[in-house]
Image: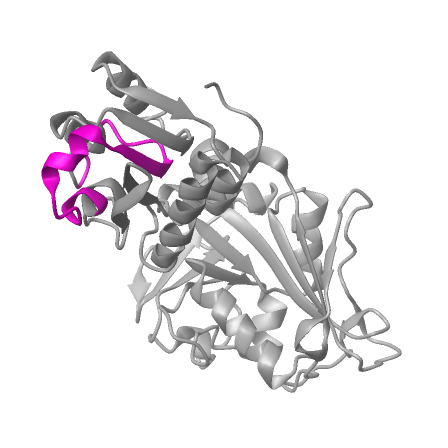
Amino acid sequence: MTKDEKYIARCLQLAKNGFNNAAPNPMVGAVIVHNDRVIGEGYHVRCGEAHAEVNAIRSVKEESLLKESTIYVSLEPCSHYGKTPPCADLIIEKQIPKVVVGCMDPFSLVAGRGIEKLRNAGIEVKVGVLEEECQHLIRRFITFNTQKRPYITLKWAESADGFIDVLRTDGHPILLSSPLTSMIVHKRRAEHKAILVGRRTALLDNPSLTTRNWYGENPIRLVIDKDLTLPRELQLFNGQVKTLVFTQQDVTSVQNSVEFVRLDFSRNILPQIMEVLYQRKVQSVLVEGGSTLLQSFIEDDLWDEVYIETSPIMLKAGVKAPQMKDKCIFLTDNNFGRNIRYALNRPSTRGKQGK
């Protein structure tokens, strides 16, 4: 590992501290180095607050050293006025002579302009150190800004023989997850802005779709109910968490934190749902629906990550688990006493950018 890679790796470590609070902004870390000694560090703690570069500069005790230092940052410094002033301007103001950047910013208001501004000010800028790692860290932010839709994670648990449930008409689903893996599911919920289920899952399982077994904000609940036939007594409608109901009915009112969104069910509704969520700046969505809903995302190639938990339980019959396409490459993890398969779909968050 080169010196530059070492410090960008530290930027990535710092950036992860903002995982639950930085969104919809990207996670970013910054390190300031003087004569191969770290004199300042920072990360983007929370959306609307100071960026990583600002926090790193503020942490330096001897400001005079900045004129002889290098600032490492996992993402290109911003060049526009948003909720905070441009970080590129602050770097220029402090006369930091060199900037090392992990990856360029895909956000249209930055997209190379920060680097250009720094270079025009006579600052040496190096771009593309641990680029793939930096892009992977902010893959949700990149997908949202380049694909114009939320980052989509599919999740389900299946039996050892490939079923996700028995055929039933009651509200007692088969428990395929262990207490530990169930807690991990709640952790994933806390890591997403919204969670989506279909009508059948809402009706039969009556889920609350909250993060009650993990610390973190509850995701926005999304449910598809074409004809508005779901009983109002379901937990989804208890008013504790904001809920969007996608329907073909012409209902515009908001009732008890429940909002109805009309879709055209004569067309594919998934792109319509993605457009609604994009316009509402929902950056990530976890799909926990039944087999039909999950399979529709797979068939449309409309997903970015998938988590599949395989239980040792044999069901022998029931609702078949979704089937991934042949091109899907899984990474297998046998932690938690279960076979957890994980895959990343698209390479859109990777690839080389101009130096």
Q: Is residue 62 part of the magenta span, yes or no?
A: yes
Image spot of residue 162 (x, y percent):
83, 69
What residue sits 48% from the left and 72% below the top? 209
Q: Decide if residue 104 is on the left or right side of residue 225.
A: left
Q: Is residue 297 left or right of residue 133?
A: right
In x, y percent, where is residue 333?
71, 65
Q: Residue at x 38, y 46 (%)?
A: 11
- Between 8 and 264, the residue placed more toward the observer is 8
Q: Which residue is situated farthest in the front direction here?
A: 35
Which x, y percent locates residue 139? Answer: 49, 43
- Residue 260 versus residue 269 in the image, above or below: below
Between 330 and 59, the residue placed more toward the observer is: 59
Q: Is residue 189 left or right of residue 73?
A: right
Query: Which percent across, then down, holds residue 340?
Result: 70, 67
User: To which quarter of the image does residue 310 belong?
Assistant: bottom right
Q: Is the residue 144 above or below the residue 67 in the image?
A: below
Looking at the image, which residue is at 73% across and 70% down?
334
In front here: 94 or 76?
94
Residue at position x 16%, y 29% from top? 67
Magenta stretch, residue numbers: 56-83
Tell me, yes or no, if residue 204 can be seen here: yes
In the image as oriented, which residue stretches furthest toward the right?
A: 316
